[in-house]
Amino acid sequence: MKAAVRPFHREDLRQVLRLLGALNGEIEAQLLDALEDALAAELDAPAVLTELGGRVIPPGLWDELRGMDEAKEIIERRVILPLAEPELAARHAVAPPKAIVLFGPPGTGKTTFAKGIASRLGWPFVEIEPAELGAEGAERQAKLLADTFDRLLELPAAVVFVDEVEDLASIRQEERRVSPSITNEFLKQIPRMREAAHHLLACATNSVGLLDPAFLRPGRFDYVLPVGPPNDEARAAIWGRYVGEITDEPVDIGVLVTATPLFTPADIEWAARKAAQRAFEREHFEGNGSRATTDDFLAAITETRPTLTPEMVEAFESDTARFSRA
Ligand SMILES: Nc1ncnc2c1ncn2[C@@H]1O[C@H](COP(=O)(O)OP(=O)(O)OP(=O)(O)O)[C@@H](O)[C@H]1O
Ligand SMILES: [Mg+2]
């Protein structure tokens, strides 16, 4: 049977199996999985992946995401576990998620979370940018997007990431960066993604409030998850990570946490790199051999403009109350 269906596309295989299932009564889910896996292994996945600009994220990225325990735990439980343990999920009639939205201010870790999910699952990560489709004319761009999804579905598994999804699906059409035919094509492709067993669509946005509520509906997106500003504990964990990479001097993390109330993880990473640069330059120009100290970090912090404002934090909290669905 495997040989007989070899020339078929994955979707065709699924249809064949469904048909057989209808004819013969039930086809065992395991057999279906085994056949799909066998077929998948025969497709030239690495070539397709390269063509799509995707890559395999090394395991361990998930653990490099420090703090953010709440977001991590929710994603771990709702998204990763059912995909990583499909049999257990099926036993409890838990449908594995197919599409999620991550929202939050810039630099809070949405992209990194999506990559982290890919790294945890061992699935390749592919980012698509519908607003950057390099073709002339809306119709051709829409066709290109459809082709991209065809290719994506040829991969045995993938986390498909769409950043700044408000460009595609704002409440008001005039605020979209793409033509309506691209938005429509994207909406058409989501159900196809949902039918694929080993594909997860992860969309990210800084402005969840701009998204059309119909776009966000359950049935299209399983979860709408906040990735917010790091609290004191999260900042301590994030500082701990970067300080540990940069210096072996004793650094007072508590002081850094207090000095950075409106810093995102990205701001912390930036300030930490600045502190490292200071210590490097000092040793080069002054011959003082110490690695970065608390003072270097504090000086770097004063030179870093935090991304967040109290208004942004407040807006995020009200967005969370209004839009999050976990
Ligand atoms: N929890 C974390 N621990 C350590 N580093 C983090 C954490 N979250 C994010 N970072 C780092 O911060 C940087 C920014 O993260 P990322 O690009 O994922 O943010 P984003 O929410 O996608 O931002 P944007 O909205 O601008 O796209 C990355 O370099 C990432 O490594
Ligand atoms: Mg991002």
Image (tube, grey):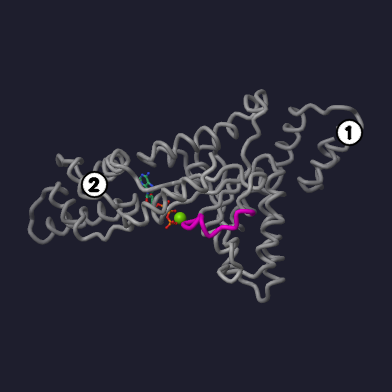
> In this figure, which residue is indicated by the disc labeled 1?
22
Res 97 quadrant in image: top right
Residue 80 at least partly seen: yes
Q: Position of residue 190 (x, y in %)?
A: 68, 51
- In the picture, measured across the screen, residue 143 lies left or right of residue 260, that is right
Residue 115 at least partly seen: no
- In the picture, measured across the screen, residue 140 lies left or right of residue 46, that is right
> In this figure, which residue is indicated by the disc labeled 2?
246
The residue carrying pointer 2 sits among few (fewer than 14), some (14 to 19) or many (20 or more) residues within 10 Å by Cα, namely some
* Residue at (44% x, 48% y) in the render: 112
Q: Is residue 263 above or below residue 116?
A: below
Question: Secondary structure of the magenta portion, mostly?
Answer: loop
Q: Position of residue 189 (x, y in %)?
A: 70, 54
Mark 2: secondary structure: helix
Q: Amino acid at mark 1?
A: Ala
Mark 1: secondary structure: helix
Q: Position of residue 208 (x, y in %)?
A: 51, 55
Whether the residue under disc 2 has CB within 8 Å of ligand 1: no
Q: Which residues are magenta?
A: 205-214
Q: Is residue 213 magenta?
A: yes
Camera-side residue of 280 and 294: 294
Q: Is residue 3 above or below residue 188?
A: above
Q: Which badge, 1 or 2, comes first in the chain's sequence?
A: 1
* Residue at (44% x, 40% y) in the render: 71
Residue located farthest toward the bottom when viewing the structure as drawn: 136
Q: Amino acid at mark 2?
A: Ile
The residue carrying pointer 1 sits among few (fewer than 14), some (14 to 19) or many (20 or more) residues within 10 Å by Cα, namely few
C-alpha gap between disc 1 and disc 2? 61 Å
Q: Is residue 59 magenta?
A: no
* Residue at (64% x, 54% y) in the render: 214
Camera-side residue of 277 and 177: 177
